[in-house]
Amino acid sequence: MANLNSNYGGLALKNPFIAAASPLTSDLASAKQLQSGGAAAVVLPSLFEEMIEQDAKHLEQYLGKIQSYKDALDIPVLGSLNGVTESGWLENALQLEQAGCDAIELNIYYIAADAAQSSDQIERRYIDLVYKLRAQVKIAIMVKLTSQFSSIAHLVKRLEDTGVNGVVLFNRFYLPDIDLDTLSVTPTLSLSQSQESLLRIRWIAILREQVRLSLCATGGIHSVQDTAKALLAGADAVQLCSVLFQQGVDELPRLLSGLDQWIEENPFSSVTDLKGKLSYGNVSDRSGYERQNYLQVLQANDS
């Protein structure tokens, strides 16, 4: 059997599969099923600052959940934090650390809707916040980013300079819809598709040789093939969500078995062996990750 061990931001994982923040990680019974199925770590659903402001019991319940998960599970437990104010981020992050979680995933879900805010101002807001969090929180910190930045590589490099342990690429925005019957804006939920993984794979490949922090792919990871591509690009871990909703928790052991078989059938003996083999810095033609890919696709369709 292949060695599926991986290191993600200082967390020793028995394989690269992490159960992403979702309703599947929201209760202990489900988390136990995920662990039994082979998940190497679980990320709790996000704790929103707005919810705490409405009712402080949300924080108490979340902290209690972390403690119960740590008592019952043998795999790393990551808290997920989604804040608004600087004080909220800092205070709640410290609470999560004290409750015993192994790492904190910062889910910085922010829509830059104000035309008066420049891209540099928004990036500085991220960086300043993470610097302050890193100065106070001792456990691993992962930053979950969206793809909607003008220079993703530069931002990730700046985040690395703050001392964070990893980045998660990319957050999926749940897009609002317009109900034509009621003439109102309504929320929508759509599960990811495998094709979406290619955006994550591309940027992980570009980043792998430029940063030392851990890289995690989330969004569109549905198959062994998606996982192998992400690892070859340079990912240290992948997060699973939609595929578990669609196929059930039993998909986890199938993915584990399939990844083991894929590694055995290729010139590798472990996850470590294949990490980054096809990253931007290791391929013979880097243009495939850049503009050339666009030109080749257009030329192929024109012929």
Image (spheres, grey):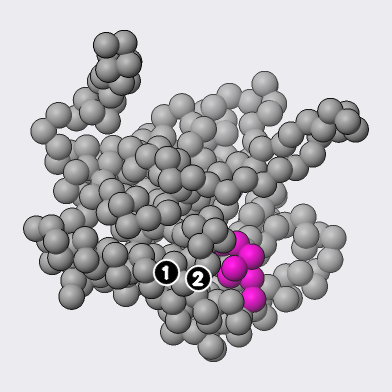
Q: How far apart are marks 1 and 2 (CA)?
A: 6 Å
User: What's the mark number on residue 222?
Assistant: none
Q: Is residue 258 magenta?
A: no
Q: Name the residue under label 2.
A: 249
Residue at figure coordinates x 42%, y 54% from the top left = 222
Label 1: how many Cα within 10 Å (few below 14, some 14–19, many 20+): many
User: Which residue extends farthest right?
Assistant: 182
Residue at figure coordinates x 55%, y 77% from the top left = 31
User: Which residue extends farthest top?
Assistant: 302
Q: What residue type is labelled 1?
A: Leu
Say above or below: 231 vs 290: below
Say above or below: 102 vs 182: below
Q: Position of residue 196 (x, y in %)?
A: 45, 41
Q: Which amino acid does label 2 sit on?
A: Val
The magenta segment: 20-27
Q: In which quarter of the image is the C terminus?
A: top left
Counting labels gives 2
Q: Where is residue 23 in the image (x, y as percent from the top left)?
A: 64, 65
User: What's the mark number on residue 252?
Assistant: 1
Q: Quadrant of residue 82?
A: bottom right
Can you see residue 105? no
What secondary structure is found at the residue carrying circle 2? loop
User: Which residue extends farthest front?
Assistant: 303
Say above or below: 38 vs 142: below
Residue at figure coordinates x 64%, y 76% from the top left = 27
